[in-house]
Amino acid sequence: MEKLLLRHKELKIDNWFEELESSIKQERVFFDNPKGNAYDFNEALKNLPQIKPSMIDLDNRKIVIGKESDINDRDLGKMKETLHELCPWRKGPFDFFGIDIDTEWQSWMKWDRIKNHLGDIKDKRILDIGSSNGYYMFRLAAEDPLIALGVEPQHSFYFQYLALQKYLQLENVFCLPIRFDTLPVMDEYFDLIFCMGILYHRKSPVEMLQEIHKLMRRGGNLIVENLVLESQKGLCLFPESRYAKMRNVFFIPDIKCMQSWLERAGFSNIKCIDVSKTTIEEQRQTDWIQTESLINFFDPEDHTKTIEGYPAPVRAIFTASA
């Protein structure tokens, strides 16, 4: 993260710099004394062999790092074992020196829905909230933004990011293992913010959108993806206990309600650019997650409903301007 500090010193940013530096110092402490699964992931990371990839491809459905010919059989076996220790791999896919990481989500499908709505991101400042292992930031890096910063508090995903960056070494991509609400208030800093698959986990979604708005430069763009109901009535579902076996789903708005949230938060030029049912082609169980996946969340007799009887997952993507 020292590179992140250096990048911001070059940009002569000082109003929130000390707070960001504090977050990075906390990250150093995190590595000095990792606990629980963070300790296990940190130990696993140490076992990855030192290899320089002969090629990198960020501009493809599957992010490719190196070739199988770059690595000997012993190191290849060690790498595959270590990568499995960092499970579950949710976002991807990746090709790691010939190792095919078939992630739970085919994230390129979502990328294909948004890529034509990004505009010119060269030299832009980008934030990815809940960045997971960095798949979308790495895809963005192919377009040469000034900085892509992710925040990801889940240890397994954060250490996956570190494993990828060990070989990618992208100098304009960074991630902090912190929650969004502990990020310094970087007023009017970001040109583009991603908030994908996060909002329905929040007890106060409009408040979160207002906090996001504060971070955006005038004319900056937001790309937000959320679970929605397929109606235009201004309705919102509040699941009684669980939704698709998830306890932490609080509000699922319909499309009109979601647009109202964005308006209330101060956004303009609001557009719904995509509405897609989540399918077992996009989200499914693989050898790289070892947990249940979408098929287990449906009513086994009726895939238009969740196992609790609610409408099955539909996700909408919205763009909006600050």
Image (cartoon, rainbow, N blue to C red):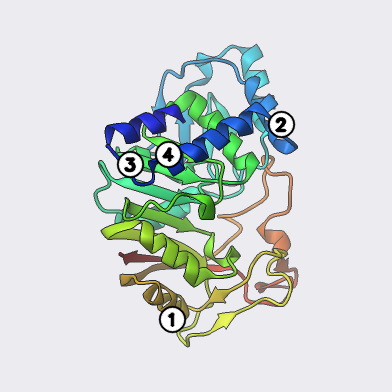
For the residues carrying marks 2 and 1, which lies nearer the camera in this image? 2
* Res 84 → quadrant: top right
Contact between labelled residues 4 and 3, with CB atoms less than 8 Å apart = no
* Res 213 → quadrant: bottom left
Label drawn at residue 14: 3
Q: Which mark sits nearer the N-terminus, 4 or 1? A: 4
Q: Which of 73 and 139 is in front in this view?
A: 139
Residue indicated by mark 1: 256
Q: Which amino acid does label 3 sit on?
A: Asp
Q: Which mark sits nearer the N-terminus, 2 or 3? A: 3
For the residues carrying marks 2 and 4, which lies nearer the camera in this image? 2
Q: Distance between the residues labelled 2 and 3?
A: 33 Å
Contact between labelled residues 3 and 2, with CB atoms less than 8 Å apart = no
Q: How crowded is mark 2: few (under 14 residues within 10 Å), some or many (20 or more)?
A: some
Q: What residue type is labelled 1?
A: Lys
Q: Which mark sits nearer the N-terminus, 3 or 4? A: 3
Residue indicated by mark 4: 138
Q: How far apart are marks 2 and 4 (CA)?
A: 25 Å
Taking the spot 66% from the left edge, 35% from the top edge, the residue there is: 86
Q: Which mark sits nearer the N-terminus, 3 or 1? A: 3
